[in-house]
Image (cartoon, rainbow, N blue to C red):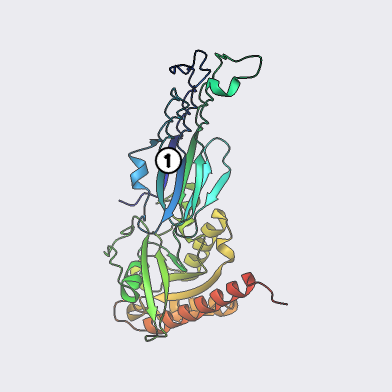
């Protein structure tokens, strides 16, 4: 089950209470205060992990609590600290404060760790309140309560390339041809009900390179208003470097104008926002083995006017698939190099 949203409530451990006690030793008639401090409450920690790829473990277990600190004891004994609780999330998870909507942290790398609820401080025992004029203090502190927060988790897949297009445009078939992914493929719309990821390898060892492709469930007109599957999965291509826009140029789609299909999907991307419509894009005419020549020519002319790279493929027969795969790989490599150059420190 693919779950990409969850709401959780976390409660850090309360601090233990400080102790009020006095020493009772042989030959020491006035032993003095000996109350120990309470232990600190455990923190709730969130950590990104490559072993997780969905938020399903939060959907059915929304409340999480760390251990509380033990109370202080006599003989100046401090109570034991509460155990921390570590919550694992997939890489690509964004953590939002449910109350304010503020982004708390975006987990983009493995093993990132932050404290999302701080444990309460343990109370002080009466040993800390003794002075030269107040030698038998009965004051002691109660433990502080741990933080209690409600968060919203939103998973955005980390992929280099996103496949978009109308339902049944051939996205699932393409990702099954260029990677080891095995999505559901059938001759009816909306066969893909959740995003699929595939790793594509190009070149030969030891110089081979790879990139990740995300197959997003098909969009239709009005998706930004909730039509079809809506735009609930578009967040998964927010982080992509390149979009590959598949357009069905066969007569089996039931839609007469491939250019209009292209414009509708672009309108949905623009309505969703987050810069999707401005991403680098490759236009792909799919199902070329049964293509309508007029549709193919019209789509190619539109891509030329917009100065967009254009490829013709048939994922069923394999025609043009390798050329597209290497073209995508080249653009991903160029994007990665530009990104590395932008973040590299300047050496004087």
Determine whether, in the image, residue 310 is placed left or right of residue 55: right
* 158 and 111: which is toward the camera: 111
* 27 and 89: which is toward the camera: 27
x and y percent of residue 83 in the render? 40, 38
* 16 and 160: which is toward the camera: 16
Task: Give neighbour class at mark 1: few <14, some 14-19, many 20+ (Cα, 10 Å).
Answer: many
Residue 297 seen in the figure:
no
Q: How many marks?
A: 1
**Residue sitting at 52 percent across and 57 percent down?**
268
x and y percent of residue 107 in the render? 49, 54
x and y percent of residue 200 in the render? 38, 75
Residue 155 seen in the figure:
yes
Q: Is residue 166 above or below residue 80?
A: below
Q: Which residue is mark 1?
A: 84
x and y percent of residue 184 in the render? 27, 62
Quarter assignment of residue 325? bottom left
Mark 1 secondary-structure assignment: loop
**Residue sitting at 37 percent across and 71 percent down?**
199
Q: Is residue 236 above or below residue 325?
A: above
Quarter assignment of residue 213? bottom left
* 238 and 285: which is toward the camera: 238
Q: Is residue 118 above or below residue 308?
A: above
Most extreme residue toward the right, as rendered? 348
**Residue sitting at 42 percent across and 40 percent down?**
84
Q: Quadrant of the C terminus?
A: bottom right
């Amino acid at each position: 089950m693919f779950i990409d949203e969850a709401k959780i409530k976390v409660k850090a451990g309360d601090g233990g209470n400080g102790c009020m006690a006095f020493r009772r030793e042989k030959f020491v008639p006035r032993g003095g205060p000996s109350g120990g401090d309470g232990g600190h409450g455990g923190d709730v920690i969130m950590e990104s992990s490559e072993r997780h790829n969905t938020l399903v473990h939060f959907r059915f277990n929304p409340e999480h609590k760390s251990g509380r600190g033990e109370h202080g004891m006599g003989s100046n004994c401090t109570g034991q600290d509460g155990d921390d609780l570590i919550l694992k999330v997939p890489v690509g998870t964004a953590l939002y404060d449910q109350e304010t909507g503020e982004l708390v942290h975006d987990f983009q790398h493995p093993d990132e760790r932050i404290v999302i609820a701080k444990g309460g401080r343990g109370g002080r025992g009466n040993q800390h309140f003794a002075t030269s004029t107040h030698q038998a203090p009965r004051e002691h502190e109660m433990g502080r309560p741990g933080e209690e927060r409600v968060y919203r988790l939103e998973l955005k897949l980390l992929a280099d390339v996103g496949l978009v297009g109308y339902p049944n445009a051939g996205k699932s078939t393409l990702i099954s041809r260029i990677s080891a992914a095995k999505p559901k493929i059938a001759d009816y719309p909306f066969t893909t009900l959740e995003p699929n990821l595939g790793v594509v390898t190009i070149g030969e060892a030891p110089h081979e390179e790879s990139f990740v492709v995300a197959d997003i469930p098909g969009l239709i007109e009005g998706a930004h208003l909730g039509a079809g599957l809506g735009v609930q999965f578009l967040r998964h291509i927010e982080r992509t470097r390149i979009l590959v826009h598949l357009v069905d140029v066969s007569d089996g789609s039931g839609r007469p104008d491939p250019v209009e299909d292209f414009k509708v999907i672009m309108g949905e991307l623009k309505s969703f926002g987050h810069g999707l419509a401005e991403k680098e894009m490759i236009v792909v005419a799919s199902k070329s083995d049964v293509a309508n020549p007029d549709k193919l020519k019209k789509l190619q002319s539109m891509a030329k006017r917009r100065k967009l790279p254009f490829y013709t493929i048939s994922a069923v027969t394999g025609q043009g698939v390798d050329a597209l795969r290497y073209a995508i790989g080249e653009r991903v490599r160029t994007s990665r190099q530009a990104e590395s150059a932008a973040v590299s420190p300047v050496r004087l």
